[in-house]
Amino acid sequence: MAEPVWFHIDVNSAFLSWTAAYRTLVEGRSPDLRDIPSVIANDKNLRTSIVLAKSTPAKKYGVKTGEQLGMARDKCPNLVVAEPDYALYVASSRRLMALLREVSPVVEQYSIDEAWVDMTGMAGLYGPPVLAAQHLKDRISRTLGFTVNIGVSCNKLLAKMASDFEKPDKCHTLFAHEIPSKLWPLPIRELFFVGGAAQRKMENLGIHTI
């Protein structure tokens, strides 16, 4: 029986990536939002508008997802703001899921921009898991115009953790033999489903890493 293999696919800064891909590929606009300090946010009210997604150049200014747009603009005065387009995001998500279902019959969508794909027993079709993940990542970029991270492991939890490693446009593994070196040293908050309350409780008990 084949060893289980799961991929976790996570779109890099999904709302911004999808907006940027549409603007560049469909509308022919430049510059690419991903190459400049930019965010997705409602630009009508600086005090109440929240940053929904940010570009890598914006991140270098300290701009954070979830902060007020006014604070982001204080950090980066030349910040470009693009309005959210939820219909576009739903359509982009559906295209991604359709592509994933061409690769495997078992696709479990977790959110609008994340999914697990069961790749167990697929080596005869796509090669070793890491090579298959690289090819899938590149196919998504080439076909759909945006980048993803792919985590590769023997179960969904570890694949999800692996996809959150260094971004963007990367493939990472987290198999059982890699857990002590890759997973255990991470801060306890990095563990999937550990929120702020659980983090505080564990840190009060002296538990600071996974």
Image (cartoon, rainbow, N blue to C red):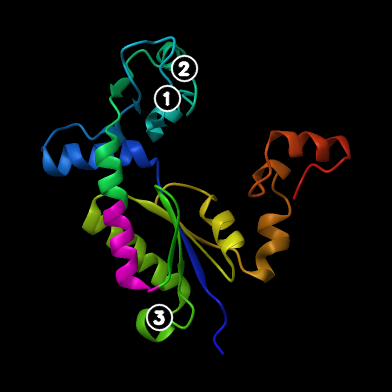
Are dots 1 and 2 in contact, CB under 8 Å?
A: yes
Disc number for residue 68: 2
Q: Is residue 26 magenta?
A: no
Task: Report the Cα–Cα distance between label 1 and label 2.
Answer: 6 Å
SS at mark 3? loop
Q: Amino acid at mark 3?
A: Gly
Question: Which residue matches tag 3?
Answer: 127
Q: Residue furthest bottom?
A: 1
Q: Would residue 180 be found to the left or right of residue 19 on screen?
A: right
Picture coordinates of residue 201, whole percent (x, y): 82, 37
Q: Secondary structure at mark 2?
A: loop
- In the image, is residue 102 part of the stretch drawn in magenta? yes
User: Does 186 sit above or below residue 81?
Assistant: below
Q: Which mark, residue 51?
A: 1
Give, as a single range, the part of the protein colored magenta.
94-105
Whether residue 10 appears in this view of the structure is no
